[in-house]
Amino acid sequence: MDKVVVVVGPTASGKSDLSIKLSKKVNAEIINADSRQIYSLMDIGTAKPTPQQLETIQHYLVSIRDPDYNFNVMEFKDLCKASLQKIINKNKVPILCGGSGQYIYSVIQNWSLGKVPPDPEFRQAMHSYAERYGAEKLFARLKTIDPLKAESIDYRNIPRVIRALEILNQPSQLVTEADPFFDNLNFLIVGVTQERSLLYSNIDHRVDQMVANGLLEEVQSLLNKGFPPTLRAFNSPGYRELISYTTQDITWDDAVSKIKTKTHTLARKQYNWFKPNDHSIHWFDSSRPNYSNDVHELVQTFLKS
């Protein structure tokens, strides 16, 4: 079986830096599994690897779509397969790195994914139901039909709940079969974490750095290029808040504060995907000096086994 190293964890925990260090030591290439780093022109706010890092180590699935492209987990899985095949054919080690739980688990659990087109009437009916009875009642419907799927969705995320129900409402032949390619891979999952207050402090510092590095200018450039403020891609922390600042809906200090708070929330949600008590994940505290040496030792043992 071909071996794949997977690096997961919350935002700002050090996943990218660790993956780059590992790549240099074990002759690896990196596949991005961050749902926002997929998009071009969104470099600062999504904390993409630097141009120097991208030049040093081959990365896949970074800046491959325009911000107005409706990218999804099914397309990610297909592109990830192609990237894995390229790396394996070069006799190199694939490192799948990111914090987007859906993307990661679609690969390592070999999800069967729905090719279900949008159903406007169904969506409208579900939105009306949610408005009348509340998000929890809508979520309860999903939990009754598919409790496993419900575990992966925040009940407050009404569009995602509706999409899950929409797929379940369609004929079963519209769901793809699991791809045997992924069943023939052996995954080592490395989790990168930190004590919560330290992680939040790192997030706040990184937001300040993003702002200093020109995040506002990046947002203004996207708007000047004609991308509408309502884009789904702009749900990533930093973009929606600074758009509100440019329209004078909130102050600068409020915008920066909201970015930090939203990123804290993102980190908590990522821990719902990558649980600290999940024994299939080998967790490492990235605040510990030289922790990457221990990760390297684990990876070397895995690759030799």
Image (cartoon, rainbow, N blue to C red):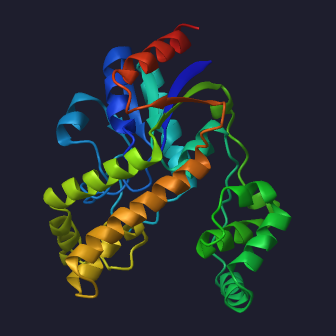
Q: Residue furthest front?
A: 197
The percent position of residue 225, horizontal first and vertical second, equals 20, 74
The residue drawn where x is 61% and y is 43% is 275
Task: Look at 34% across and 21% down and name the residue there.
Answer: 290
Q: Height in image: 1 above or below 203?
A: above
In the rendered image, the residue lying farthest to the right is 144
| Location of residue 202 with respect to 136 vertically, above or below | above
Query: Which of the image's four quarters has the N terminus?
Result: top right
Q: Residue at x 69, y 90 (%)?
A: 128
Tally of marks: 0
Q: In the rendered view, does 85 fall on the left or right side of 41?
A: right
Residue 268 image position (x, y, % from top left):
52, 55
Q: Residue at x 17, y 70 (%)?
A: 221
User: Where, by quadrant of the figure, is residue 150 drawn?
Assistant: bottom right
Residue 87: where, in percent of width, then height?
43, 26
Q: Residue 63: where, in percent of width, then height?
A: 31, 51
Q: Nearer the viewer, residue 258 or 23?
A: 258
Q: Is residue 102 visible?
A: yes
> Quick check: 257 above or below 296?
below
Q: For residue 244, which quarter of the picture?
A: bottom left
The image shows residue 295, relative to residue 249, as above or below, that is above
Judge by depth and name the residue closer to the eye, 291 or 183.
291
Q: Is residue 147 shown left or right of residue 26?
A: right
Q: Quadrant of the C terminus?
A: top right
- Whether residue 11 is visible, yes or no, is no
